[in-house]
Image (cartoon, helix red, strand yellow):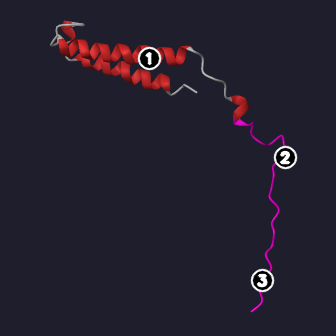
Amino acid sequence: MPKSRVRKKKVYTAPAELRPKTPESTHQPSPTWVPVLAVILIVLGIGWLVTFYLTEGSFPVAPWGYWNLAVGFASLVASLLVLSRWR
């Protein structure tokens, strides 16, 4: 049986004014405050949690009780949000 002919289709390219801008030109490097703030938040959150556990809840803020855990973990989550902006 003879082989069928393979048809070559032309690839469509949109006009230049309809093409989206290249992502390389729109992305800028992150400012230096982004990683610095993220590291500060990580150290602050871990330090807060460690201090709370080592002092058995009497420090950093005794009346807050277990809300000190929320403050420490909120600092760690905030550092993740800041790191999501880092390029």
Query: At label 2, which amino acid type do we have?
Result: Pro
User: Which residue: 37% across, 18% down?
Assistant: 75
Q: Nearer the viewer, mark 1 or mark 2?
A: 1
Marks 1 and 2 sit apart, C-alpha to C-alpha, by: 45 Å
User: Which residue: 48% across, 14% down?
Assistant: 37
Element assignment for label 1: helix
x then y, percent, for residue 78: 42, 21
Give the residue at the far bottom of this rendering: 1
Element assignment for label 3: loop
Q: Are marks 1 and 2 in contact (CB under 8 Å)?
A: no
Q: Are marks 2 and 3 in contact (CB under 8 Å)?
A: no
- Magenta region, main secondary structure: loop
Residue 39 quadrant:
top left
Q: In the visual, does 19 lie left or right of 58?
A: right
Q: In the visual, does 79 lie left or right of 13?
A: left
Mark closest to the chain's N terminus, 2 or 3: 3
User: Which residue: 74% across, 40% down?
Assistant: 20
Marks 3 and 1 sit apart, C-alpha to C-alpha, by: 63 Å
Q: In the visual, does 20 lie left or right of 86?
A: right
Mark on residue 15?
2
Residue labelled with disc 1: 39
Residue 15 painted magenta:
yes
> Compared to 77, does 40 lie above or below?
above
